[in-house]
Amino acid sequence: MRKKRQAPAGAPAWMVTYGDMMTLLLCFFVLLAALANFDDRDKLFMAAIESIRQAFGNQSQTGYFSDDVIDFKSFLIQFETIIIKNENKNLGHADDPGVDGRFYRVKQIRDGIQLVVGGPIAFARFSAEIEPDMDRLLEKLATELRGKRNKIEIRGHAAYEPLPLDSPHADPLDLSYARARNTRDRLVELGVPRRAIRVEAAGPYEPVLDQTYDDGRRAANRRVEIILTQSRIDDYNAKPQTPEDLARQARSSP
């Protein structure tokens, strides 16, 4: 009686090659997902993608964005992560920007991204001097803005209350402008182009909290808003006039 031929022990030789190919394909698609543009509604998923980008040395999403333009989706997730890390100091946090203790806020708006820093971590009462916690945040912000050509708006705010008699500021509007200007000057010191920054003052006229009967509530209105816009510095450069332009102006002048 002929003995049955037994199959060789172990997996077939082609199985090893097949397994390696599947592993490489999986890694390839993970990288594609990490470098793609996704909707930012799933914050945890976007944060994981941002971590993969940084692990591979890519600080922002790739695609049609040039090196001197801010990638807003990547920037939004990155600064939300930075702000969450700062919440271990019992500063308070809530989804409603009008709730007490909301001293950091990052959100995407029509023109770009709005980063709001306020309360005791930004400015002391009646002061325009930048506090250490805010300065650390500005250092991280400047790291991302250096070399970019996006226009930046800095809008200062102040609480609705009379200033002390010895205040160097004329009124809350002047105080809010000083806060915005000092924020601008600090970013310039950190390497952000001066001509990219526009400074505005809103005074006490755009509060995030009304009925501020105590300093705890008034603190929420001591803030600056840093708005990173989609406009670029080049959009505001005046074009040199050609001889035809000069001749046209001469004909139209009386």
Image (cartoon, grey):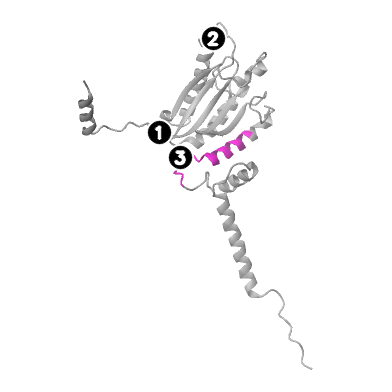
Q: Say if the magenta span includes residue 235.
A: no
Q: Residue 167 carries which label?
A: 2
Residue at 48% across / 48% down in the picture? 63
Q: Earlier in the sequence, mark 1 or mark 2?
A: 2
Label 1 belongs to which residue? 233
Circle 3 packing at 10 Å, graded few (<14), some (14-19), many (20+), is some
Q: In this view, does 73 lie to the left or right of 44?
A: left
The amino acid marked with disc number 2 is Ser
Tag 3 near tag 1, CB within 8 Å? no
The amino acid marked with disc number 1 is Ile
Question: From which residue to which does the magenta span run?
Answer: 64-83
The amino acid marked with disc number 3 is Val
**Which of the 4 quarters of the picture holds residue 50?**
top right
Q: Is residue 72 left or right of residue 23?
A: left
Residue at 66% across / 18% down in the picture? 217
Label 3 belongs to which residue? 69
